[in-house]
Amino acid sequence: MTQKYMVEPDLGFINEVVGLGGDTLKKCFQCATCSVACPISPEEKPFPRKEMIAASWGLKDKLVGSADIWLCHQCGDCSTMCPRGAAPGDVLGAIRSYAINEYAQPKILGKMVNDRSKLGILTAVPAAIFAFFAFLTVFGHEFFAKIFGGEFWYHTHDGLPVPGIAASNFISSWFVDIVFVPLALGVVVVFALGLKRFIADMHTNAVQEGKTARTDFDWKEYLQATWKTLITIGKHKKFSECGENRERATAHMMVLFSFIGLAIVTGLVFIGVYFMHQATPYSQLNPIKWVANVSGVALIIGVFLMIKSRLGKKDQKSAYKDWYILGVIMVVAVTGMFTQMFRLGGVAFLSYLAYYIHLIAVFHLFAYLPFSKMAHLVYRTAAMGYQTYSGRK
Ligand code: SF4
Ligand code: SF4
């Protein structure tokens, strides 16, 4: 006997997916070519056709908590093959953006990050914070040094400014860390809360849809499976299986490993400054500088290749969220290099200006990370880990 289902479409969800770049959604006539064309779709319950049906019916809960939307690497193979121009790769990208907003709190911030008209206010906040701290560092030093002691300001043993041009003479490293350390902790908390819900939803969905035989959920085993998945992610194995956009793997890998290199550098500098009293900037001969410079250059090249690839793909849609994150990363990388180059060239004003813009861009990257496209790093890792955990091939 045929089973009856009550479908309760969420029209708001459909409209938001359309607004996030999934406006081709309604063109789909369910031929399933896309699921056959996808090089990385599982044999059992393949994507993206079933997601196209669910999205056009407005089945939000079925989609936002599904691991499958994250298994897609937006290579575009399915969109190229789609006979109706329904661009399923782009629709899945739009659903992922929706899912990021759904799991990250506060939602209002997620909406702002994805709204180009709010870029000004999102930039004005860090611009005002760092302008205030620059003012305090440059003009308030003597006054506050009497209260807190000179060392409070510049990270030197004697509390005096670093000789010559140094970023901490313009905005004390203390102030930079006062902003970024709590921010980093806040981002970890936002991600942790979002992931807790997302992992629970993925498991519920997988059990309901028969994608896994495991009805239990064991956190220890899940974390072990996710750990194993990190090797696949690091090697970009899934990217390499794509046809249309295979060259994206190189650019993506350059960006990923540059960020890892820069994170290591930041950690080492933090230890150097706070625990070993080593004031920055470091000598160009210092190995930490080598890693920083190689990572910085690789980051610029990687993002440049990504932008070039996007501009060259006329059939692949690029939404505001795509350009926003590429723009932010490019500004972070270029201003980081300019800060150093102008310092070495002895042009203090331009070095400090570049550093000021650099801090604003880094703030964008950090503070808005759980709401931007960069959040895919976390959610895709969690979904790929769940795929391994659930035994889905
Ligand atoms: S998205 Fe295109 S290829 Fe996929 S089922 Fe719909 S019409 Fe067919
Ligand atoms: S964009 Fe690529 S990975 Fe994603 S569903 Fe289409 S073919 Fe598969």
Image (tube, helix red, strand yellow):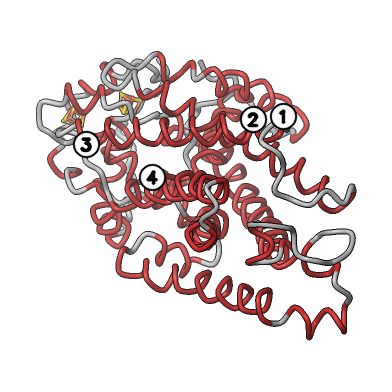
Determine the secondary structure under disc 2.
Answer: helix
The residue tagged 2 is 290
Q: Earlier in the sequence, mark 4 or mark 3?
A: 3
Q: Are marks 2 and 1 in contact (CB under 8 Å)?
A: yes
C-alpha span from label 1 to label 4: 28 Å
Q: In the rendering, at what x and y percent does residue 19 appear? A: 25, 56
Q: Earlier in the sequence, mark 2 or mark 3?
A: 2
The number of discs equals: 4
C-alpha span from label 2 to label 4: 24 Å
Q: In the rendering, at what x and y percent does residue 361 appear? A: 49, 57
The residue tagged 3 is 311
Q: Residue at x 41, y 45 (%)?
A: 330
The residue tagged 4 is 326
Q: Quadrant of residue 154?
A: bottom right
Amino acid type, mark 2? Trp
Whether disc 3's CB lies below 8 Å from ligand 2 is answered no
Q: In the rendering, at what x and y percent does residue 284 appear? A: 66, 35
Q: Earlier in the sequence, mark 1 or mark 4?
A: 1
Vertical arrangement, residue 187 with respect to residue 96, above or below: below
